[in-house]
Amino acid sequence: MNESIHPDGCLYFAANSLARHLNNLAENAFKFTCITPAYAFVMLEILKDPGLGQNELARRVNVKASTMTRFVDKLIEKQLIKRTTEGRSVKIFPTKEGEDFKPIIEQALTILHDSYCDLLGKDLAMNMTDQLQDINHILEK
C-alpha cells in the first residue's frame, strides 16, 4: 500500500477517540455510585456468576490478571465482594452489600444508555453496539 492513511481514516484512532467520549459519559453516569464504570462491569460479572475464578473474570472483562487483582482489591476494600481460596484456586463472590448494590449499578447503566442514545439516536447506538460486539468477537479469536 503506497497511499498514506490519515488518522481520520484509521480504525485505531477512531476507536480510541470514541472510547474517550464514551468514558466521559460513563464517568458522569456512574459518579453517584462512588465506583468507576470498570468496577461496575466487574461487579456485574461477579453478580451474574458468583464464584468465578479471578483469571476467568479477567478474561471476561478483557484485562490483564494484574489489573484484575487491583480491581478485586478495590472492590473488597469497598466491601462489595469477597475472595476465597480453595487449594490453588481463588474464587470471587459478592457480599450482601454487593448484591444490594446491583440496582444502583443498573440505574447508572440506564443513565449511561439514555445519554448516548440521546446523543446518537437509539438506532445508531444499538447498531454500533452490535457491530462493536461483533468486532470484539472476531478479534478475540
Image: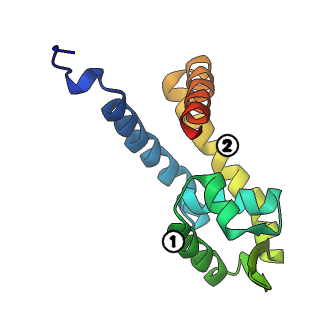
Res 18 → quadrant: top left
- Residue 128: image quadrant is top right
Secondary structure beneath disc 2? helix
Q: Residue at x 46, y 41 (%)?
A: 22
Camera-nearest label, 1 or 2: 1
Residue occupying image coordinates x 72% and y 57%: 44
The residue under label 2 is: 110
Give coordinates of residue 122: x percent, y percent: 61, 22
User: Would you call the spot at circle 2 few (<14 residues within 10 Å), some (14-19), or many (20 or more)?
Assistant: few
Q: Residue at x 15, y 19 (%)?
A: 4
**Of pointers 1 and 2, the one earlier in the residue sequence:** 1
Q: Position of residue 56 (x, y in %)?
A: 69, 61
Q: Is residue 115 left or right of residue 82?
A: left
**Viewport quadrant of the C terminus:** top right
Query: Left or right of 38: which side holds 101?
Result: right
- Taking depth in this image into account, of 24 and 68 the one nearest to the observer is 68
